[in-house]
Amino acid sequence: MPSIAAIQLNGSSDIERNFRQTAALVAEAAAAGASLIATPEATDYLGPHEEKVALAEPIDGPRARRYAALAAQHGVQLLIGSVAERGPSPPGGGPPTHAYNTSLLFGPDGSLQASYRKIHLFDVDLLGQGGVRFAESARTLPGDRLVVAETPLGPLGLSVCYDLRFPELYRGLIDRGATLLSVPSAFTLMTGKDHWHTLLRARAIECQATVIAPAQWGPHDDGGLRRSYGHALIIDAWGTVLAECGDGEGFCIAQVHPARTARIRQEIPLAAHRRL
């Protein structure tokens, strides 16, 4: 039975360190039998946004090619939860002022099979509750397209982190045939402890889909701006947590049962019952 793995990282502004950790965990997950491996949001860089824009590359740039080679080395499908994709130059010329937050799916041969630009950007003010103030849109452009990619385990609908709070996005992915959903994230500690498990299980149940949610964990070297919750998860179409990471870097792994998803959809035919 095929397996999927969700990786948990403690990302930083050190791109080389991030890649070494990612490569080591991908190798371990592949050795454990995972054929689809997913990494968190901001796999390549998690630090100040001004530097992120300056460091951003095209999706066929040198850092993306290293991830492609990693997928080919281990013969797995590799979802890099997100990277900083170079944005357009401003109308008057000059260097880009914004990047995209982009998921990349590589095939076992290293080919780029799909890319998805995060649609919903994390602009929140939680200081009054002891949390963070964060304006992702200050340096990031939103995507505008839903993406479903083919995998041997079934069609995979792509999303990133804050997208999780918008169920209409996932309904759109299911309408396009998805039976698996990826939610690579860097959920803050404050919101994660209250909302992470609940939202992910809700998406799995209402979409009747397997959810793979790799995660960032711990404090990051972005000036103390944020600390990530972690708890990378794999959840089946019934809402059952199949695997979960604890504290620290690592991965969780679980078998995928497409027939179980199909049976759940047959027994409770939500798609046929929808009225809106």
Image (cartoon, helix red, strand yellow):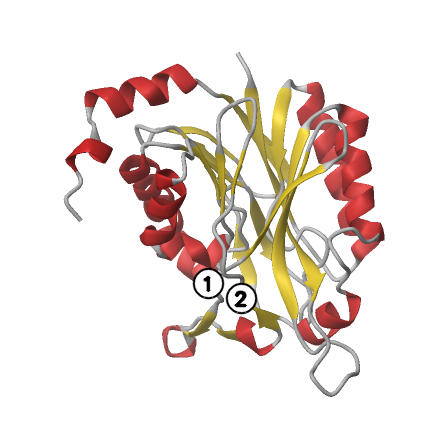
The crowding category of the residue bearing disc 2, from other C-alpha atoms within 10 Å (few below 14, some 14 to 19, many at least 20), is some
Distance between the alpha carbons at the discs numbered 1 and 2: 7 Å
The residue tagged with tag 1: helix, strand or loop?
A: loop
Q: Nearer the viewer, residue 192 or 44?
A: 44
Q: Which mark is residue 237?
A: none
The answer to whether 108 is drawn above or below residue 246 in the figure is: above
- Residue 27 drawn at (x, y percent): 75, 28
**Which mark sits nearer the N-terminus, 1 or 2?**
1
Q: Nearer the viewer, residue 228 or 178?
A: 178
Specify whether residue 194 is in view.
no
Side of 160 where 72 appears, left or right: right
Q: Residue at x 49, y 49 (%)?
A: 159
Estimate how packed mark 1 is, as few (under 14), some (14 to 19) or many (20 or more) residues with alpha carbons within 10 Å.
Answer: many
Badge 1 is on which residue? 120
Residue with the mark numbered 2 = 142
Secondary structure of residue under mark 2: loop
